[in-house]
């Protein structure tokens, strides 16, 4: 390799125009690739795309209708704006909603069946469980019949009674109330009422608008446009009425806008820091070429992502400062070694190429491993950094030696400082102290266990979501139970059977369709119970008739009721529920279409035509009840926040262990082949180990969990640490000049690049910045001070 670099230098020395054309070619090809590039912000880029349980669960969740809903709550701050005023404003906003972004807008009840209560009564035989049977038994005592009929007589004397006269005739004992309790199981919002013709809370201070949106959660551009539409609508509100809008797309838009702002802020800050470093350490006319190196590398890496992925993740380019900080290292080492002026430029280039090639190959190899990652975002990051580093390495070895003459100041002529005995003791004592602190912090290290932590969650959205749940009485921390099958009856049956496994306190909190639509087998049993029940109470009709006469009812006033008791019960179907007027509620729980993913590795099939969704409390007992064996037996899948968190933690743990071990093994092999000395291998690896220990210690002490991008950051720490170790080992072994200054300045540029990410609001960028920044604070001093304190030229060469 050294001979190739030397021969290439001699060949291109008379052909510099060709090199300039190569640089222009890189710029032109990169520009063409970037021009056709499309970006999107999708949480899927941060999750495995293999057929894992985690990825399958996330795909299944997307099939839930409520995941595509937009919920807008309008709040009247003053009493003068509540009630009718709020109702008119609600109607105004609902009518102004753009159908391009909102469909199926609902802010008032759909038209109910005029015979709603009679229809509920007709459903009662198919719902006649033991619990309802017991309650009806209490309603048909002689005393209760008399009390109920007296109330009915009083109602008939009111305006309500005139409207409900047919209902009273058909159901004088209010048997429909038993079915009404089952209907309540469909209500996802417990506190919703109908006032002034719209959905409101009981106090009239909050109104509700619900709509579906065609905007996909993964469509970042459309999500931002939807956010703009929200702002347009809210400008129409009068002073004193405040909106709260909740939708998954708002989180997508927040992530996109946050990443956009973060890229702008971190890039500007990194450029300012790099400019200051250049002024302090690199006051030379060659600065243009030193800064051109990371720019060209960035363009090449971005072009590789643009060619390989359409669309590409916008987050990948948020790590631009990372690549800038890494690639400039090659140029800085070349710059300082060429500036030592002890030998001819060709000979100095030979010496410089050895550590540059070793560090470049090991770092590139470590990041190339990420191409095997199951996470698409890490694969894109791998391509971005690997291609960028490869471009930087080639330019450093073959192009820039013709344009860089090296540092001309005396500081470049100083090797790594040897340590006196006292200084050595102090340095090693400080190093041991930091190692102890790092080990203490690592003992508290843990992995990310909440799926929502992968993206940014603005306070205004989180607080708004909590407030909406409180206002409308929606459950918190719910789990979703998905049952899939070839027919509605199949999924209802499977759901019913699996829910029977729950403890009573959890079963009463279930929101679902099965209480109102039992499977056909259960309906037949209930109908038989109904017939047997009335066969055992044949005198109820006589009692009603006699009590009615006493109260002044006509002899045949309740004939429809008597006929009903003699009628053969009929089955309940979806058509019955839609005719009842609760079709919109049913549609939030029943999906009659094919979900995007079909079969997962554990054998659970969700490719059926019908999927029924039930909402359960996310408790320990619920999660324990739905074991993999139970899910397979009943054809259901329970997805909860706690389960997703556990699955995410497993993925992160295995990914972290896998790539750190593979990267260490690959780097050790490369270094061992080149150095063939145990001491030199230990010396080259020590800064990397020190950096990883410091990184883990900082995360543990801050009680911050490791994320996917912390894992990528660990590889960066490993790569940078090995770079510093290789340069320092080579300098100690050969008494090379300029290395200490090169490590210092390159370390500062890397700290500037990664430190700028600490200003990011997006957790992925921040985690990357914190992991590498803390790791470099351990690796760089180790290379500059600890290695010279441990090894000398004679000891490391022996």
Image (cartoon, rainbow, N blue to C red):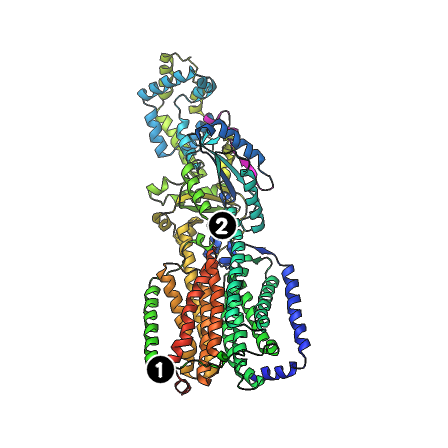
Badge 2, how many Cα within 10 Å: few under 14, some, many 20+?
some
Main secondary structure along the magenta-highlighted residues: loop
Depth check: give the residue in front, 68 or 112: 68
Residue 605 visible to the viewer: no
Residue 318 percent location from the top left of the image: 53, 60
Q: Is residue 779 left or right of residue 5?
A: left
Q: Residue at x 42, y 75 (%)?
A: 783
Residue 411 percent location from the top left of the image: 48, 78
Residue 772 percent location from the top left of the image: 45, 65
Q: What's drawn in magenta, residue-wise?
A: 100-117
Which quadrant would the C terminus be assigned to in this image?
A: bottom left
- Quadrant hosting residue 647: bottom left
- For the residue labelled by badge 2, is the local secondary structure a helix, a strand or a loop? helix
Depth check: give the residue in front, 192 or 26: 26
Identify the disc placed on residue 541. Answer: none
State yes or no: residue 116 in magenta: yes
- Quadrant hosting residue 105: top right
Depth check: give the residue in front, 277 or 71: 277
N-terminal-most mark, 1 or 2: 2
Q: Residue at x 50, y 32 (%)?
A: 576
Which quadrant would the N terminus be assigned to in this image?
A: bottom right
Q: Residue at x 54, y 51 (%)?
A: 218
Pointer 1 residue: 420
Residue 68 visible to the viewer: yes
Residue 628 percent location from the top left of the image: 40, 54
Identify the disc placed on residue 60. Answer: 2
């Amino acid at each position: 390799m050294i001979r190739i670099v030397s021969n290439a230098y001699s060949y291109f020395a008379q052909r510099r125009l060709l090199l300039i054309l190569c640089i222009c070619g890189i710029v032109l090809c990169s520009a063409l690739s970037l021009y056709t590039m499309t970006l999107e912000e999708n949480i899927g880029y941060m999750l495995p795309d293999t057929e894992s349980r985690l990825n399958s669960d996330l795909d299944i969740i997307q099939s839930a209708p409520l995941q595509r809903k937009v919920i807008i709550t309008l709040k009247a701050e003053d009493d003068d704006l509540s009630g009718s005023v709020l109702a008119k404003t609600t109607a105004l906003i609902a009518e102004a909603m753009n159908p391009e972004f909102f469909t199926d807008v609902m802010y008032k009840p759909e038209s109910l069946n005029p015979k709603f209560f009679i229809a509920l009564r007709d459903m009662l035989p198919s719902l006649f469980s033991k619990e309802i049977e017991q309650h009806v038994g209490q309603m048909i005592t002689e005393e209760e019949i008399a009390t109920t009929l007296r109330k009915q007589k009083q109602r008939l004397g009111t305006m309500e009674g005139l409207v409900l006269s047919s209902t009273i005739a058909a159901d004088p004992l209010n048997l429909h109330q038993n079915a009404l309790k089952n209907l309540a199981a469909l209500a996802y919002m417990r506190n919703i009422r109908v006032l002034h013709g719209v959905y409101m809370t009981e106090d009239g201070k909050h109104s509700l608008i619900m709509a579906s949106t065609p905007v996909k959660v993964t469509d970042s551009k459309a999500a931002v446009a939807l956010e703009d539409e929200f702002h347009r609508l809210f400008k129409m509100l009068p002073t004193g009425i405040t909106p709260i809008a909740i939708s998954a797309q708002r989180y997508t838009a927040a992530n996109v806008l946050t990443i956009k702002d973060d890229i702008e802020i971190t890039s500007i800050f990194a450029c300012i820091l790099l400019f200051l470093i250049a002024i302090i350490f690199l006051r030379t006319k060659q600065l243009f070429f030193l800064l051109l190196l990371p720019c060209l590398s960035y363009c090449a890496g971005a072009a590789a992502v643009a060619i390989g992925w359409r669309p590409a993740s916008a987050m990948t380019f948020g790590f631009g400062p990372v690549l800038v900080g890494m690639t400039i290292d090659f140029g800085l080492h070349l710059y300082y070694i060429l500036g030592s002026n002890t030998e001819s430029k060709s000979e100095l280039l030979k010496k410089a190429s050895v550590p540059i090639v070793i560090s470049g190959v090991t770092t590139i190899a470590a990041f190339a491993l990420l191409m095997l990652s199951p996470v698409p975002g890490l694969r894109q990051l791998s391509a971005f950094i690997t291609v960028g580093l490869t471009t930087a390495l080639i330019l450093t070895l073959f192009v820039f030696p013709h344009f860089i003459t090296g540092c001309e100041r005396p500081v470049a002529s100083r090797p790594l400082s040897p340590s006196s005995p006292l200084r050595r003791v102090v340095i090693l004592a400080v190093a041991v102290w930091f190692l102890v602190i790092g080990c203490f912090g690592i003992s508290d290290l843990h992995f990310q266990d909440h799926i929502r932590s992968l993206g940014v969650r603005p306070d205004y959205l989180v607080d708004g979501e909590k407030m909406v749940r409180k206002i409308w009485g929606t459950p918190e921390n719910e789990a979703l139970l998905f049952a899939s099958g070839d027919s509605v009856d199949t999924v209802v049956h499977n759901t019913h059977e699996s829910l029977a496994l729950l403890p009573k306190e959890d079963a009463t909190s279930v929101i679902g369709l099965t209480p109102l639509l039992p499977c056909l087998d259960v309906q037949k049993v209930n109908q038989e119970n109904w017939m047997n029940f009335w066969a055992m109470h044949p005198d109820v009709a006589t009692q009603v008739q006699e009590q009615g006469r006493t109260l002044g009812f006509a002899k045949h006033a309740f004939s429809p009721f008597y006929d009903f008791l003699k009628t053969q019960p009929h089955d309940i179907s979806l058509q019955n529920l839609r005719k009842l007027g609760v079709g919109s509620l049913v549609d939030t729980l029943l999906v009659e279409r094919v979900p995007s993913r079909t079969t997962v590795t554990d054998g659970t099939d969700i490719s059926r035509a019908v999927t029924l969704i039930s909402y359960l409390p996310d408790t320990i007992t619920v999660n324990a009840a739905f074991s993999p064996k139970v899910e397979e037996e009943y054809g259901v899948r329970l997805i909860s926040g706690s389960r997703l968190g556990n699955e995410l933690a497993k993925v992160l743990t295995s990914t972290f262990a896998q790539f750190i071990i593979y990267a260490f093994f690959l780097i050790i092999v490369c270094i061992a082949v080149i150095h063939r000395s145990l001491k030199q291998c230990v010396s080259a690896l020590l800064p990397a180990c020190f950096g990883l220990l410091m990184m883990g210690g900082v995360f543990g002490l801050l009680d911050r969990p490791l994320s996917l991008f912390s894992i990528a950051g660990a590889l960066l720490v490993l790569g940078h640490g090995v770079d510093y170790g290789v340069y320092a080992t080579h300098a100690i072994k050969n008494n090379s000049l300029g290395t200490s200054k090169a490590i210092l300045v390159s370390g500062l540029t890397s700290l500037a690049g990664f430190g700028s990410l600490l200003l990011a609001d997006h957790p992925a960028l921040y985690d990357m910045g914190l992991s590498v920044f803390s790791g470099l604070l351990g690796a760089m001093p180790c290379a500059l001070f600890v290695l010279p304190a441990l090894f000398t030229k004679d000891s490391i060469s022996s």
